[in-house]
Amino acid sequence: MDLLEVKDVKRQLLDNDGQKIDILENINFSVEPGEFVSIIGPSGCGKTTLLRLISGLDKPEQGSVSVNGEVVKKPDVSRGYVFQHASLYPWETIEGNISSGLKAVYGRNYDHELVNHYIDLMGLQGFEKSFPHQVSGGMAQRAALARSIIMNPEVLLLDEPMGALDAFTRADVQNVIYRVWQKTKTAMILVTHDIDEAVYLSQKIIVMTPRPGKIKDVVINDLPFPRQRDSDAFLKMRQNLQEKLKFGFNTESSK
Amino acid sequence: MSDRQQKKQSQIADLTVKYWKKWDYRWNILSVVVVVAALLENLFVPAQELVDNTVYRYFLVIYGLYLIGIYLYGRFVSFKAHFYAGHFAQLNTIIGILLLGQDLLTEKFARFTLPFFVSFAQILDQIREDHQLLWESTESSLVLWLVSFIIGTLIGVGLGLAMGRYRQANYWAFPFLKVIGIIPAAAWMPLTMILFPTSYSAEVFLIVFSVWFPVAFMTIGGVQGIPTAYFESAHTLGFSEWRIIRKVVIPGAMPSIFIGIYTALGLSFMTLVISEMMGAKVGLGWYINWAKGTGNYTQVYASIAIMALLFSIIFSLLTTVQEKVLRWRDNSTGI
């Protein structure tokens, strides 16, 4: 059975003139347990909105999102969310941030060992007592990832978590996400506009068109893991996606 | 480089930003020389007014020894003291010159004369002479202020948090806050003196009134300025509403709350003194009023001097608390 099902989802917003505009239209797809899915598309195609609908932070006008057959109504610990800007609490230490969800759910007797485990896994040793502004962007994003994955969610939603990082840090965080996925086998949905990233990490790539956001194509990416960024198959897959996205950009410019 | 060295390096970097004037022996020596000169001047220049200079001389000796001590400590022991002492050497020089100058202008050459102008020596001597009454006054002012300020701050923060977080609370309370809060506390004074059973409770009310509004107002703004993503991540991490209040709303609004508290601080001191002058039978404000009645302006100066000391101690305590509470802030960007 599918873990997550998005069915006929439509989302509208009011523009500056008070006109209703379609952000998302006719969105249908599903995610299996443990699957890594990327949603890729040009900016403004509603991919972040889609992720927010899945998390329950936003509600669709029509259609539904369901997890294990249950319709999503509000945010829940079972659907982790990593924001583009780490959004760690600046007043909590790195350790405090990572354990914040555990404390909320299990109280003071949460599993301290688990926190240490993730601090090690994310390479954050020595920075437990640092505040977010004292660590690099990549470290902050790894801590944000740890904060969500430590709750053992059924699906982890990643909203362009590498978007604000430089190229080196980006590759580093991508590898961390890959390692975490391999270890935990948590289903992941990654929103990105970086083709490379989508090809490197995901098994299924959903290509979206610009406004109104529709699913243009679903590409199955069955390259073996761990993937080599310079292999022929990788580059071919990359090119394939680039072609599909070009179409998307053209419709935007002809509008 | 070891962690410890690295930590020291970054501490030094912070200190050079805070205490930016460079260590300079000439200023260090000059500041001590000036204080010594002020002492010698007080000892040997003949006075035209009759003043007991004992306390003032002790003060100058202690001040001079303090300067020498902190320079030696900064030179040989502590790098923190080094930056601090070096930075303030110029200021200490000016303070020494001012002490020297005021003594000459009042007590020695009588350019400014009693009863309206007094030398610093005379203020110190007045404090010594009247220390029992002044101590009682200070104590009662401090207790009154502390109780009222805490009540006012709690009301302000509580109301501000509720109004910043809940639309209903904001809808019902904000119009009243806007209209009532803006009235200066002193305007209520004639009414409170009659309506409250004791003058003490009237004073508490007035100070609370001067405090709650700026604190509430800044708290509301602070809560509303917290990035939405902080609440959203709290929801995805399973935070309860109570936990969101404790772990997101309060710390997020804390920088603003402190701005409100600082604003309220000045207003509360003003209201404290005015209300004590109006109806009280104790306190530093009452002491001023009483001294005015007897025409002893040296006592007025003495009370003002104690207020200056007391209020600046309170102010720096608050700054220390703020630095501790907001130590998570990135000082380089001011966020």
Image (spheres, rainbow, N blue to C red):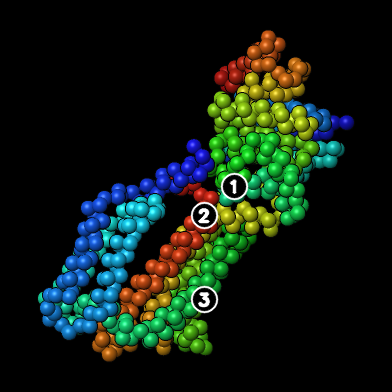
Q: In which quarter of the image is the C terminus of chain A?
A: top right
> What residue is shown with label 2?
B326
Have a look at marks 1 and 2 and say if they share a chain.
Answer: no
Q: How crowded is mark 1: few (under 14 residues within 10 Å), some or many (20 or more)?
A: few
Q: In this view, does A166 lie above or below B236?
A: above
Q: Which of B162 and B274 is in front in this view?
A: B274
Q: Kindly report the distance in space between the C-alpha atoms of the residues bearing marks 3 and 2.
A: 24 Å
Name the mark nearer the viewer: 3 or 2: 2
For this view, does A11 lie left or right of residue B3? Answer: right
Checking the image for residue A129, the label placed there is 1
Q: Residues within 10 Å of mark 2 (few under 14, many from 20)?
A: some
Name the mark nearer the viewer: 1 or 3: 1
Residue under mark 2: which chain is it in?
B
Residue under mark 3: which chain is it in?
B
Secondary structure state at the residue bearing disc 1: loop
Identify the residue at image location x=64%, y=48%: A96
